[in-house]
């Protein structure tokens, strides 16, 4: 372990956060940075330049994941990875993902300032498309790294304009082979992602550092309800097979199943409902809805999913409508590595920063990195728990504290 370190340079970090915020399709503080758009490409260039300026070796894979390596004195040992994402959903904030990328670069610069090279290489990872904005699937880059999204599945993705992923990524200059994206299982010794909490707990409790113990993972169920349409005036009530009233019963069942589940972390949401034909004087003939189900215990999440499937089929039968249920994705939740959790807690303790163990209810690239190597996350407070909005805010002091914990953890892991 490296004993002393020069402290993190808050002004330098603040400057990079401000610079990165210029690369947006909406004026700051509203961020819009969609995968491979001109502003995303310019932002990537900016990150690359920062890394090259401190003599890190850059590699880009075929989906656009960027790796910047500060080589250790024992390059044969598996590296320590740190990082996050810089893509931003339309009209979101400046801190989601970016603090994990710029904070990682600042951590490396801080450690370089000691003049001591690490034993293990330290690698910054900038993940492609953590947000599902363009291709409809979140954590595209980390899924591909972990082999959860295969080259064949990547080739099937297309954006709203009908352009397929392969064409888009080649046009953006990501010319490698999709078959080479998946990382070998022993590639990294550990991965740590610094991220804003995106929830209210740390600020409310006055605790600067959250140590994530588990990451909840979503499962998405896509339901299509087919009833019988007709004139809203002439079809009498006993003769109806209204697809929307059936869907409404299903929405309430989803809520009730999650609310009565004994797990306090179980949640289920219907956030999208499409009604056809959608006219005031027409009985809905068809409804599509998406059900998002999460829990930190995989078997319990799957049990909830089974119960929802059973109950919505019952409702369809009671109401005489047809139902098709398709499981869109069902990712396993992740447990953070106990040894890494301990390392993070020790680093915070050395800095006299109180910590709190917590569950990440949002998913992150760390969810998929956890299938590749021991993984952990450091959370810092989000003002008001607000995220994915222009008023998303984390103070520079909080960000610096998060980076200092990262520096302390790297000193323990890489030296
Ligand atoms: Zn994020």
Image: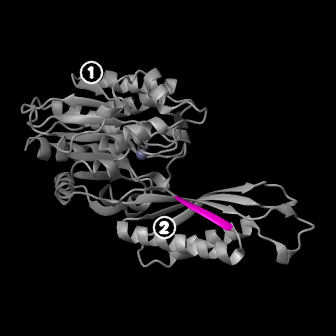
**Residue 118 location (% of width, % of height):** 10, 35
Under circle 2, the secondary element is: strand
Residue 323 magenta:
yes
Q: Is residue 275 magenta?
A: no
Q: Is residue 333 visible?
A: yes
> Image quadrant for the N terminus?
top left
Residue 160 located left or right of residue 207? right
Which residue is at 81% across, 71% downward? Answer: 240
Give the Cα distance between marks 1 and 2: 43 Å
In the picture provided, is 211 more to the left or to the right than 244? Answer: left
Q: Nearer the viewer, residue 243 or 367?
A: 243
Picture coordinates of residue 51, whole percent (x, y)? 28, 25
Q: Quadrant of residue 120?
A: top left
Horizontally, is 147 left or right of 395 in the view?
left
Mark 2 residue crowding within 10 angstroms, few (<14) / some (14–19) / many (20+): many
Q: Main secondary structure of the magenta part?
A: strand
> Dot 1, how many residues are within 10 Å of its Cα: few (below 14), some (14-19), or many (20+)?
some
**Which residue bears the numbered disc 2?**
267
Nearer to me, 414 or 290: 290
Count of marks, rendered view: 2
User: Where does label 1 land, which residue?
Assistant: 52
Quadrant location of the C terminus in the rendered image = top left
Placement of 91 over or under 258, stated as above or below: above
Residue interval drawn in magenta:
322-326
Q: Residue at x 41, y 38 (%)?
A: 152
Quadrant of the displayed image that contains ligand 1: top left
Residue 283 placed where, x, y %? 82, 63
| Residue at position x 28%, y 33% in the image | 105
Give the label, 1 or 2, closer to the camera: 2
Q: Is residue 118 above or below residue 236?
A: above
């Amino acid at each position: 372990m490296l004993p002393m370190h020069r402290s993190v340079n808050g002004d330098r970090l603040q400057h990079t956060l401000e610079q990165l915020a210029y690369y947006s399709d909406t004026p700051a503080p509203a961020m819009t940075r969609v995968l491979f758009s001109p502003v995303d490409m310019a932002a990537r260039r900016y990150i690359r330049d920062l890394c090259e300026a401190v003599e890190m070796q850059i590699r880009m894979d075929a989906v656009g994941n960027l790796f910047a390596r500060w080589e250790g004195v024992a390059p044969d040992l598996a590296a320590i990875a740190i990082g996050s994402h810089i893509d931003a959903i339309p009209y979101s904030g400046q801190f989601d993902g970016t603090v994990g990328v710029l904070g990682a670069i600042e951590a490396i610069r801080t450690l370089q300032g000691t003049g001591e090279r690490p034993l293990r290489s330290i690698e910054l990872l900038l993940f492609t498309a953590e947000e599902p904005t363009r291709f409809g699937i979140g954590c595209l880059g980390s899924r591909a790294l972990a082999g959860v999204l295969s080259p064949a599945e990547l080739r099937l993705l297309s954006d709203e304009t009908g352009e397929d992923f392969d064409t888009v990524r080649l046009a953006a200059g990501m010319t490698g082979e999709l078959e080479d994206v998946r990382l070998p299982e022993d590639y990294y010794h550990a991965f740590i992602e610094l991220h804003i909490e995106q929830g209210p707990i740390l600020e409310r409790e006055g605790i600067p550092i959250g140590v994530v113990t588990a990451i909840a993972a979503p499962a998405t169920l896509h339901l299509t309800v087919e009833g019988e349409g007709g004139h809203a005036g002439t079809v009498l009530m006993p003769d109806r097979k209204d697809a929307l009233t059936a869907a409404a019963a299903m929405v309430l069942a989803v809520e009730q199943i999650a609310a009565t589940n004994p797990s306090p972390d179980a949640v289920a949401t219907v956030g999208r409902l499409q009604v056809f034909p959608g006219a005031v004087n027409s009985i809905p003939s068809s409804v599509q809805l998406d059900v998002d189900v999460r829990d930190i215990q995989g078997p319990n999440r799957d049990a909830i999913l089974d119960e929802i499937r059973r109950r919505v089929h019952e409702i369809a039968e009671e109401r005489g409508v047809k139902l098709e249920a398709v499981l869109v994705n069902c990712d396993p939740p992740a447990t953070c590595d106990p040894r890494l959790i301990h390392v993070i807690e020790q680093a915070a303790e050395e800095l006299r920063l109180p910590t709190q163990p917590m569950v990440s209810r949002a998913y992150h690239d760390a969810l998929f990195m956890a299938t590749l190597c021991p993984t952990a996350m450091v959370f810092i407070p989000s003002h008001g728990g607000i995220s994915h909005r222009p008023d998303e805010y984390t103070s520079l002091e909080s960000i610096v504290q998060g980076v200092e914990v990262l520096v302390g953890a790297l000193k323990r892991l890489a030296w």
